[in-house]
Image (cartoon, rainbow, N blue to C red):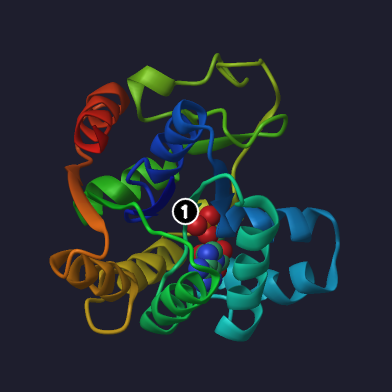
Amino acid sequence: MNILLFGPNGSGKGTQGSLLKDRFHLAHIESGAIFREHISGGTELGKKAKEYMDRGDLVPDEITIPMVLETLKEKGKNGWLLDGFPRNMVQARKLWEAMQNEGMPLDYVVEIHLGRETAKNRIMGRRLCVQDNNHPNNIYIDAIKPAGDLCRVCQGKLVTRADDQDEAAINKRHDIYYDTVNGTLAAAYFFKDLASKGLTKYIELDGAGDINTVKEALIARLG
Ligand code: AMP
């Protein structure tokens, strides 16, 4: 099964993604996480990507598109969940083109809806576990509040991402997401249009509920 996941930064997309990954045994391919691995590994790609990420800008397509498409081919043979990509129309078209060339089906496209203010608060409360990127912690969400200063799952050390604490950068990321002409919602609607032609299935979810409510709604729709 191959699934594309859309939602504004802060909508719980990463959390729902890791639940889906476990349930359907999918490779969870998260473009932001791949960039962060490159940064912590000190690679050339990481150095180039960091300046864009710190500002809340998109990393240029000529870096991002080949990186994600290669990861899909390498790790996605038995099904994938793509999260954080595509983020604009060029990426959407290139992804669809590559999938058609590879004969890869697109089973579902999931879009999580969430208001901009709520999304911003959730981002600023987010904490990352240094042991495991898939351990959700957020100081503003009761269900996933850290254990004191430590990860609620493994008691690992928690850190914040520089771009999570910078309000101007968050606004910039949301401007990109909510842009229905060239931005991420435009990319989502590209796939919604394909769904209207019967080429994939498009699922819309209300992301305002707690993690389990959103998860159950999602699982019910996946059938
Ligand atoms: P995320 O973890 O999804 O919030 O991504 C963190 C940052 O990585 C973004 O703000 C961008 O700078 C960069 N990034 C992640 N995915 C993409 C993408 N598909 N295209 C361009 N830049 C991206």
- The answer to whether residue 150 shows anywhere in this view is yes
In the image, residue 116 sits, relative to residue 127, either above or below, namely below
For the residue carrying disc 1, how many other residues have a C-alpha within 10 Å: few (<14), some (14-19), or many (20+)?
many
Looking at the picture, does residue 76 appear above or below residue 96? above
Q: Residue at x 44, y 21 (%)?
A: 145
Residue of label 1: 83
Task: Identify whether 99 is placed above or below 136.
Answer: below
Marks counted in the figure total: 1
| Closer-to-camera residue (66/145) | 66
On the picture, is 223 further left or further right than 126? Answer: left
From the viewer's perspective, tell me whether residue 190 is left or right of residue 3: left
Quadrant of the rendering where the C terminus is positioned: top left
Query: Is disc 1's CB within 8 Å of ligand 1?
Result: yes
Q: Which quadrant holds residue 63?
A: bottom right
Q: Which quadrant does the N terminus fall into?
A: top left
The percent coordinates of residue 149 (x first, y second) are: 60, 21
The residue depicted at 43 percent of the width and 34 percent of the height is 20
The structure residue drawn at horizontal position 43% and vertical position 22%, both measured from the top left corner, is 144
**Looking at the image, which is closer to me, 165 or 119?**
119
Nearer to us in this view, 106 or 89: 106
Quarter of the rendering containing residue 185 = bottom left
Q: Using the rendered image of the protein, determine whether residue 56 is visible from the camera's viewpoint.
A: no
Dot 1 amino acid type: Asp
